[in-house]
Image (spheres, grey):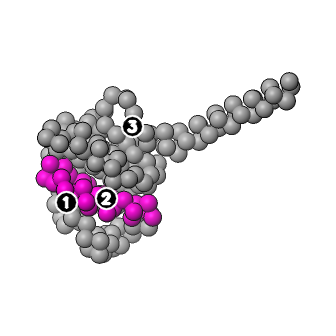
Amino acid sequence: MRRRVIGWGVGIVAICVLAASLEAAGVADTPRSSAAPKPAPAIEVTTLDGRTISLEALKGKVVLVDFWATWCPPCREEIPHFIQLYNTYAPKIEILGVAMDEEGEEVVAPFVKEHQIPYPIAIGTEALMDAFGGVRGLPTTFVVDPKGRIIRKYLGYQELEVFEQDIRALLPDS
């Protein structure tokens, strides 16, 4: 009997440690949450091609804001998904890639050219990550609805269908 109680105690502690670890790693943000949408931050970025983009100006569109890096394998795996989504749904959606490479434009611009990324890419900063409530890992993607509210946050690699489902749910004629 005592072994069973100890076994249950160890199991409960292990579950609590795992849950706390997942929360600290941001994985708890990944599933679709039923939390109320919150306003997207009022950010303005300059893209690699010199354009200035603000989330405020993109209201009326579904926007995916993807924090990524050229050195990040899961990020690189997601890029073809974003290219496909952009080519399928633009101009009803916008995708904003935020590259977090320390070397900045020097490494990001050749990568964007090589992979023929058609959507705007900006170089990220700590302040930009903080504006989104802190980005705790890459890739991290925020889904912003046409009203300018963050409705989803995904940490880590996601399949194309995950983003496509969100887009279709938010577009009136899909």
> CB atoms at circles 2 and 3 under 8 Å apart?
no
Position of 116 relative to 125 (above/below): below
Q: Residue 139, located in which quarter of the rendered image?
A: bottom left
Separation of marks 1 and 2 at Cα, in angstroms? 10 Å
Q: Position of residue 112 (x, y in %)?
A: 28, 70
**In the image, what residue type sits under mark 3?**
Arg
Quarter containing the N terminus: top right
The reply to whether residue 130 is in sight is no
Q: Residue at x 22, y 39 (%)?
A: 170
**In the image, what residue type sits under mark 1?**
Asn
Callout 3 environment at 10 Å: few (<14), some (14 to 19), or many (20+)?
A: few
Q: Which residue is mark 1?
A: 87
Position of 69 relative to 5 (above/below): below
Q: Residue at x 49, y 39 (%)?
A: 28
Q: Secondary structure at mark 3?
A: loop
Q: Residue 119, located in which quarter of the rendered image?
A: bottom left
Magenta span: 72-98
Q: Is residue 12 located in the magenta-colored stretch of the structure? A: no
Q: Which residue is mark 2?
A: 81
Point out the tag, 2 or 3, that comes first from the N-terminus. 3
Q: Secondary structure at mark 2?
A: helix
Separation of marks 1 and 3 at Cα, in angstroms? 25 Å
Q: Which residue is mark 3?
A: 32
> CB atoms at circles 1 and 3 under 8 Å apart?
no
Q: Residue at x 81, y 28 (%)?
A: 4
